[in-house]
Image (cartoon, grey):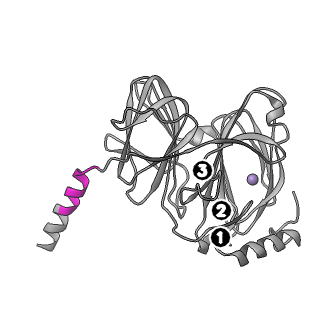
Amino acid sequence: MAFFVMAVITSFKRAVMIKRRVDRMIPSIETSDGAGVKLRRSIGSSHFLRLDPFLMLDEFYSDDPNDYLAGFPSHPHRGFETVTYMIDGFMRHVDSMGNSGVIGPGDVQWMSAGRGVIHSEMPEQTEGRMRGFQLWINLPAAAKMKPPTYQDIPKDSIPEFSEATGLRVRIIAGRFEYDGRVIPGPINALSADPYFLDVYLPAGHSVSVALPLTHNSCVYVYEGEAMIGDETTLLVHRAAAILTEGDTVDIMASKNGARFLLLAGRPLNEPIVQHGPFVMTTREEIEEAISDYQCGRLTDSAKV
Ligand code: MN
């Protein structure tokens, strides 16, 4: 009997879809970081504008080398993950773990700083367009002091779902479900179970994406125009549209089509104390990070 009741409840749950809608917007503001790279920051533009577990979302997009040439010379991180997704242009990274490489259009660099990484992120071009995103994902307290890890994910190893209509979904992390098929991204087994999808929707088309009920989520339109569900208001361009709770989100493109990121992650619900590139749970841990960095103890090797 108990089994029967459970089965009924399970199928009932599956049958009812809770559609996510727009809860609030975090517009992007123009700022600069590194040695003077111009970018737009939405999530994380203030400490009050985060979306647990996401700490920051930066979009960099310029055809003017003066906006990006200075790059991000040697700097530290502790306590979270950084994800760099290139749309156009090339960036070279060098880090204290001994990794070095260039990421280009469609490539991803996924770094878990753990207890400490010192790295540099510098443009590998002197002209042309530089365009992409950097997302910071918090780590739970229990994982903040783990050894750092690093993954370069070339374009070709990122699954892309496409349809005859022109719909394209690149699955960088998380899963994309379509017609009973589940396509997982190459990044797995992270504490926040993050979803990082890059979607192109042709004019007038829509897509329905399943997301775990437990996750916070947002949509960031970076080209064209889109709407959520049956809402008639267009999402603000280059802004993070934070979604309400639910297990599905329907996104529709306007007559111009749309390109957007769909991000989701399980909230950590832990205190956040941030000092620039150090994100911990207490002030004491931040002081420790600063003194470790100053004394050359942040990483195994001293410098990049
Ligand atoms: Mn960095």
Estimate the spatial distance between the alpha carbons at disc 1 and disc 2, rounded to whole Å: 7 Å
Looking at the rendered image, the disc whose residue lies closer to the viewer, 2 or 3, is 3
Of residues 173 and 41, the one drawn nearer to the viewer in this rendering? 41
Which numbered tag is attached to residue 80?
Answer: 2
User: Is there any visible trace of residue 132 in the rendered image?
Assistant: yes
Residue wearing tag 3: 43
Name the secondary structure under disc 2: strand
**Left/right of residue 229 with respect to residue 166 in the rendered view:** left
Placement of the C terminus among the 4 image quadrants: bottom right
Magenta stretch, residue numbers: 9-17
Question: CB at mark 2 closer than 8 A to ligand 1?
Answer: no
Which numbered tag is attached to residue 23?
Answer: none
Q: Are marks 1 and 2 in contact (CB under 8 Å)?
A: yes
Q: Is residue 32 above or below residue 205?
A: below
Which numbered tag is attached to residue 144?
Answer: 1
**Left/right of residue 48 with respect to residue 263 in the rendered view:** right
- Which of pointers 1 and 2 lies earlier in the amino acid sequence? 2
- Which of pointers 2 and 3 lies earlier in the amino acid sequence? 3
Three-letter code for the amino acid on which mark 3 is drawn: Ile
Name the secondary structure under disc 3: loop
Q: Residue 207: where, in percent of width, then height?
A: 38, 35
Name which residue lies at 30% across and 50% down: 18
Three-letter code for the amino acid on which mark 1 is drawn: Lys
Q: Characterize the local packing of mark 3: few (<14), some (14-19) or many (20 or more) Cα atoms within 10 angstroms.
A: many
**Is residue 14 within the magenta segment?**
yes
Placement of the N terminus among the 4 image quadrants: bottom left
**Left/right of residue 87 with respect to residue 298 in the rendered view:** left
Three-letter code for the amino acid on which mark 2 is drawn: Phe
